[in-house]
Amino acid sequence: PTRLGIISALAEEQEGLIQAMQHAERHVHGMREYTVGNLWKVDTVAVLSRIGKVAAAMTATTLVERFGVTHILFTGVAGSADANVRVGDVVIAESLVQHDMDASPLFPRFDVPLTGLSHLPSDLGLSSRLAGAASTFLDSENGATLHRGLIGSGDQFINDGMRLAALKSALPGLLAVEMEGAAVAQVCFELGIPFAVIRTISDNANEDAATDFMAFVKTVASRYAFGIIEKFCRN
Ligand code: ADE
């Protein structure tokens, strides 16, 4: 049997999903609330990780070790790191990098030490299913585009054009920046759990990022997450 774990950092990114769950049971563990139930007939555990790599790693580990999930989706918002990726677009990770990891000169910059990996791959099958759901959903959102590629995660809200430019030149192909995905990726890699990360772009990781983020996360983020995950679970 399979059981889906769904993680978002903030309540706004997951609104509606908990209410849509049937036979929902809440369990508190490690200062988080895990809701177990059926989401369009899919056995699901939904949880808010809060922000940052450690919070996300703790949450993903608990989902697997305590709640027995067999695969994980992370859904939320991100800042754009590419001129072609616009606010309102959706990015699905092909791989994820911890952009603030730097154990050089002991290990190459971005390598997760002793794993031999900097770019942690997401599960292709799960990501493709999610991409199918996302493009069906986006067909009804005028002009929004779906992108697939590299997402960078770090314990920093990026709101500085210079900082973003430096990251982009160090990480070719970088599409978006956020604060959790690559932590979930490392946990899932180590535990052998398939996972996918989907992010709606809320801002351009520049000097306007905080204002744009606040506006967007309230108005759009939850509607996108709900619409795409509904399509994902129903098919
Ligand atoms: N999540 C959404 N926007 C972000 C940004 N600019 N930096 C980091 N995480 C984000």
Image (cartoon, helix red, strand yellow):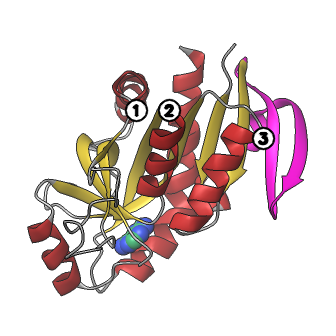
Which residue in the protein does label 2 denote? Answer: 192
> What secondary structure is marked by label 2?
loop
Up-down relation of residue 42 to residue 104 (above or below)? above
Residue that mark 1 sits on: 134
Q: Residues at badges 3 and 2 in contact (C-beta under 8 Å)?
A: no
Residue drawn at 54 percent across, 60 percent down: 219
Residue drawn at x 41%, y 55% as measured from the top left: 182
Residue pictured at 15% horizontal, 62% vertical? 171
Question: As drawn, is 234 to the left or to the right of 23?
Answer: left
Task: Say what secondary structure mark 1 lies in.
Answer: helix
Quick check: 224 left or right of 167? Answer: right
Tell me if residue 24 is in the magenta stretch: yes
Quadrant in the picture for residue 129: top left
The answer to which of 65 and 161 lies nearer the viewer is 65
Residue 66 is labelled as 3
Q: Is residue 102 left or right of residue 173?
A: right
Q: CA distance from mark 3 to mark 2?
A: 15 Å
Q: Is residue 15 visible?
A: no
Query: Which badge, 1 or 3, is on the more N-terminal residue?
Result: 3
